[in-house]
Amino acid sequence: MSPKDRTTHLLFALKDARGGFVSGETLSKAQGISRTAIWKQVAALRRLGYEIEATPRRGYRLAGAPDLLLPQEIAYGLNTRILGKEIRHLDSVTSTNGVVKSLAEAGAEEGTIVVAEVQTGGKGRLGRGWFSPRGGVWLSVLLRPAIEPIDGPKLTMVAGLGCLAALAQTGVPAAMEWPNDLMIRGRKVGGILLEVTTEPGLIEYAVVGIGINLNVDEAVFPADLRGKATSVKAELGRPVDRPAFARNLLEELERWYLALKEDRTDEMVSAWRDALGTIGKRVEVATLHERFTGDAIDIDARGSLVIRLSPRETRTLQAGDVTIIR
Ligand code: BTN
């Protein structure tokens, strides 16, 4: 075991005790190392911000964990096969999508995760910025799906369905607005930025960037977001355990990623159709080239939005901004 793995092993043993004491002897036996070595690991965990009580004869007790998206916090009890085998945590970064891209270019494994406390140049869709202060979950996932570029939007479905499932577990009524806005009561709580690198006929890798305003204080939203953005904390009136949320999110993302990999696309499309608050609504569409209004009536097998302009004319939209008018 590497020193980092040993420290994680110790942390998990303390967590398993659920606030109870674990003796130094038990801990040293479990890893086959001296009590002094255990003491050093305790010191390392304290440096990360963990509160660990040490009492003669009783041993060690975990009394508090830092409110950070530390890899070992997300990994504790994580039940996935692909996502999160490698998790990198950064306090501040320009954009987690950018870091995952560099890792992908260097050959990183599918399922690698980068998570940050703050992004200084967070990226949104259509070249916009993404406000990423402390308290949120800013996370990017590296995927290497063996699918054609034309099927890339299916990864947005995977991400959207995963996010909705994780949000549902916090108790807030979240819905999806096409293509990838996560909404609570008409305000945006999160978004997805899919960046795909292709080779002829195949996606080489995809970076799925997810931003959720989990515990972001409403008061810190800049003027242009006030009234349009919300956070889970604002909706619930209390903060949510961020590492636990990130863990659920990875599990739910993997659930839907496996549906894609195992060709259970019908199941995915039908869940996506049910999840989309956009369908059945009158919408205004803005693409790079034009604006029009119509009725959003369905999505197709690739996740494109079908809009009825008149009784005889429908349009299929792969990308663009869609605003619900009523
Ligand atoms: C949008 O709705 O416009 C998409 C927002 C996506 C934001 C996330 S935060 C983590 C990842 N890194 C980024 O720079 N952007 C995505």
Image (cartoon, grey):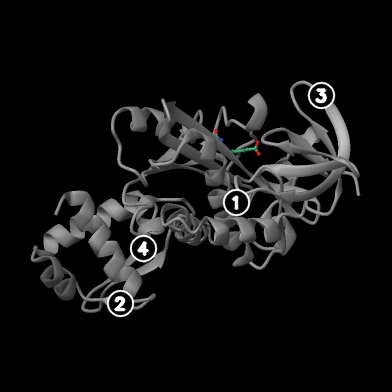
Answer yes or no: do the residues labelled 4 and 1 have beta carbons within 8 Å?
Answer: no
Q: CA distance from mark 4 to mark 1?
A: 24 Å
Residue at image mark 1: 160
Residue 3 at what x, y percent from top left?
18, 50
180 sits left or right of 85 in the view = right
The amino acid marked with disc number 2 is Phe
Residue 104 at what x, y percent from top left?
35, 32
Residue at image mark 2: 21
Mark 3, other Cα within 10 Å: few <14 / some 14–19 / many ≥20: few
Q: CA distance from mark 4 to mark 2?
A: 19 Å
**Helix or strand or loop: what does disc 1 sit on?**
helix
86 sits left or right of 185 in the view = left
Residue at image mark 3: 290
Farthest top residue? Answer: 289
The amino acid marked with disc number 1 is Gly
163 sits left or right of 283 in the view = left
**Helix or strand or loop: what does disc 3 sit on?**
loop
Answer yes or no: do the residues labelled 1 and 3 have beta carbons within 8 Å?
Answer: no
Q: Earlier in the sequence, mark 1 or mark 3?
A: 1
Whether residue 128 is visible, yes or no, is no
Answer yes or no: do the residues labelled 4 and 3 have beta carbons within 8 Å?
Answer: no
Q: CA distance from mark 1 to mark 2?
A: 41 Å
Front residue of 3/245: it is 245
> Disc 4 or disc 2, which is closer to the eye?
4
Front residue of 112/36: it is 112
Q: CA distance from mark 2 to mark 3?
A: 65 Å
Residue at image mark 4: 76
Mark 4, other Cα within 10 Å: few <14 / some 14–19 / many ≥20: some
Mark 2, other Cα within 10 Å: few <14 / some 14–19 / many ≥20: some
**Helix or strand or loop: what does disc 4 sit on?**
loop
Residue 134 at what x, y percent from top left?
57, 43
